[in-house]
Image (spheres, rainbow, N blue to C red):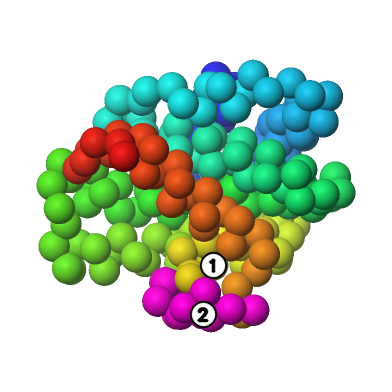
Amino acid sequence: YAQGIQLVTQLLRDAAERKSLELKPIKELVEEVINCFVLGDKTLLVLFHQEESADNYLYNHIVNVMLISVAVGLRLGYNKSGLNELGLAAFLHDIGMVEVMKIAMQPRALSVEEHDRIKEHPNYSVELLSKIKDIPKIVVDAVQQQHERINGEGYPRGLKNGEISEYARIIGAIDVYEALTHNRPYRKQL
């Protein structure tokens, strides 16, 4: 878990500074998580419930979403390749938040304009990921689509039903669950 926090901290720092982003350490972390879960070690899932401060909630959120996504993928019977893709997409799902962190960290309800700006973060994510050589398109699609909803009321493109990738639907559901069950700068956990 600590390794994941360290990695996401560096990833977001590099993204904010427009440095090149490396997939290899993320792939290695996801592989290690998969191996733990396949061997029956559920320790990482216990850490999901730890409290985070307002200053580092995004780091914990990203690691938590990746952990739960891999666990769900395993329960759905994904093969190793699918688990790796899902875990990678889950780890990268909020990388575009670096563009809107000042807005997202407000300890109050956001204005309509601020919320609209936050809703652009999947597109910022895709922009950042487009600079990574050899990133699978299925991963980029999942990152861009993770806020889309079956009824078409999601964002950024208002996709519906089968237009949304399975990975994005998994990550989207877990993203909401994780956000609701942890404190955020603007509200207490539910």
Could you tell me the amino acid type at mark 2?
Leu
Could you say whether the residue bearing mark 2 is in a helix, strand or loop? Answer: loop
Q: Which residue is mark 1?
A: 145
- In depth, the one of 28 and 170 nearer the eye is 170
- In depth, the one of 117 and 82 nearer the eye is 82
Q: Position of residue 107 (x, y in %)?
A: 15, 41
Q: Is residue 44 left or right of residue 24?
A: left
Could you say whether the residue bearing mark 1 is in a helix, strand or loop? Answer: helix
Up-down relation of residue 139 to residue 57 (above or below): below
Q: Which residue is mark 2?
A: 159
- In depth, the one of 129 and 168 nearer the eye is 168
**Residue at screen point 30% across, 53% down:** 100
Pointers 2 and 1 in contact (CB under 8 A)? yes
Could you tell me the amino acid type at mark 1?
Gln
- As for residue 170 lying within the magenta part, the answer is no
Q: Position of residue 22 (x, y in %)?
A: 64, 42
Mark 1: few/some/many CA within 10 Å (<14, 14-19, 20+): many
Magenta stretch: dominant secondary structure: loop
Residue range (magenta)? 150-162
Q: Position of residue 97 (x, y in %)?
A: 39, 51
Up-down relation of residue 161 to residue 26 (above or below): below
Q: In which quarter of the view is residue 60 placed?
A: top left
Q: Is residue 19 left or right of residue 52?
A: right
**Mark 2 or mark 1: which comes first in sequence?**
1
Cα separation, mark 2 vs mark 1, equals: 8 Å
